[in-house]
Image (cartoon, coloured by chain):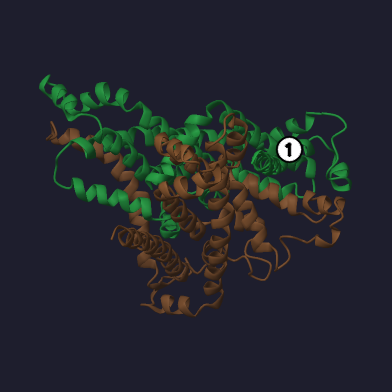
Amino acid sequence: MKSIKRFSSALIYLYASAALLPLVWMFLSAFKSDGQISQNPLGLPTHFDISVFRESWSDGGLGLYAINSFIVTFATTVIVLFTSSMAGFALSRLKFRGNVLIRGVFILGLLLPVQAYFIAQNQIFDYLHLKDTRLSLIIPYTAMGLPLAIWLVKTYIDSIPKELFEAARIDGASDIQTYRTLMLPIIRPALVNVIIFTALGAWNEFLLAILYIQNESLKTLPAGLLTYSSRYETNYQLLFAALTMVTLPMVVLYVAFNKQITRGLTQGSLKG
Amino acid sequence: MKPSSKSGLFFLLFPALAIYLFAVVAPFFGTLGLSFFRWDGYKSPTWAALDNYARAFKDQVFQSTFVHVLVYILVTLVVEVLFGLILAGYISSHKRTAFLRISLFIPVMLPSIVIAVLWSAIYNSDYGILNSMLANVGLANLQHIWLGDTKTALLSLCVVSGWIYSGFFMAIFVAAFSRLPSEVIESAALDGAGAHQIFRKIKVPMIQQSTSVAILLCITGGVQGFDLFYVMTNGGPYNTTEVPTTYLVKTVFANGEIGYGSALAIVISMVGLFAALGFRNWQNRKEEELEY
């Protein structure tokens, strides 16, 4: 019995190490010359020179892509945060004609994949000259994040005793005052989840990023990395340096906030 | 409660509704509308009635994309959901598993382009580690041009997908296992059930709802999958990894067939929707049967 247990432990840890291998290889290869990489893919680097990171960051344009991604992600997250909490509050607590209809329209959004609408969206953005602007990403990312965000906020508010809101009303607060002073602080746990999946979704989105932005100076990381990887196709070391530089901050972020991030991402998908 | 004022209600709802209607709902109906036209994006569109749909049902490449995606879904059910379940089973019955939980979840965080470029390098026949590792352990005869060989390309992509999402499903199942009442498991252990038996006969059946959701996510995720396919093989070699979404993007953005592409988009969305609804229905019926 003991030996079976040991065996399964060994198997699981072997699997986990194998799963980490690609990332370790990527990291180590960033410190090897192109010749070392192609002649001895499994070899260890002989010295740790970080100038390659500087080259990929500035000459390769990675720094610019990262700034663009940051702007788009930040704007998307802030807009989703406010608009979804406002709408979620109204849909959960206020009685008005059309409430059920509006809810239904947002639930439809949970079922529609981006393929169902991006062709006409592309035409509309073309017509309005939105393409090659940051708005052409911020608007759809916000719209794609809204259904799930509203759903999470709404179910969270549903679970709060309605007497709380009625008391605020009796004290003479308007809905908007109630939203600002009472609601926003209470629903903070739901908003943390909203921030996590919205920000990560916007940071990693690929399809619209390559379709709507051709201007090199506006590209976000995923689109920029695609250009980068074809530009440096045979420049292995620069390629691995870029991948490492994008990966490391996310690993650090995940190690620091792994509980919240795991919850945010898994909850986000379960509700959908 | 009733809203305190009409203008307040409008203020709360308008921003979300406006952005969403503009960027999702209107484009959805727009795409539906375009699917009934012949249009290259420049000349004026001409009415095509259902011609685009008729063409889609005769398009053999388009049909083959669904076969590929079906294979992909079946394989990923094993390498994502089943592996995730086994990993979660181990983690939930052991202490000090932070290393496993963190290292296996990290790929979920990464942009798919990073993963696609990294794994293209791993599969690379010149400097990739897969072939050189095989050579090192004396299995050089197993070496392949993994992404360029019609026999291995699709499966190679499934492996990457498993590498990403087994950690994701693991996290879902770990959360589900942690919600199970500990008395049930303790009493089974007292009755002499081994860890393996408890896992298979008690824990897994009790989280059936999470498993259903995971399978559902695996199906819809498969039908919508795009990034890895586009970057790593873009449909090749010889269309063997062409999936609905890569074919769609080619039709619209490389061939400029906006009307036909719109019809494909609607068909793909409906297939995804019906696959999901069908699975859910089948699950519900199975549950009813169990009750009686």
Which residue is more in the foreground, B222 or B116? B222
Q: Residue furthest top?
A: A171
What residue is at 65 percent from the left and 61 percent from the top? B155
Q: Tag 1, which chain?
A: A
Quarter of image, res A185: top left
Q: Is residue B165 visible?
A: no
What residue is at 73 percent from the left and 38 percent from the top? A24
What residue is at 82 percent from the left and 29 percent from the top? A49
What residue is at 88 percent from the left and 44 percent from the top? A35
Quarter of image, res B274: bottom left
Q: Secondary structure at mark 1?
A: helix
Q: Which residue is mark 1?
A: A24
Q: Residue furthest front?
A: B191
Which residue is more in the foreground, B44 or A16? A16
Image vertical order of residue B271 relative to residue B202, above or below: below
User: Residue A137 location in percent, x, y?
Assistant: 47, 44
Chain letter, green in picture = A
User: Residue A11 location in percent, x, y?
Assistant: 68, 44
Which residue is more in the foreground, B165 or A106? B165
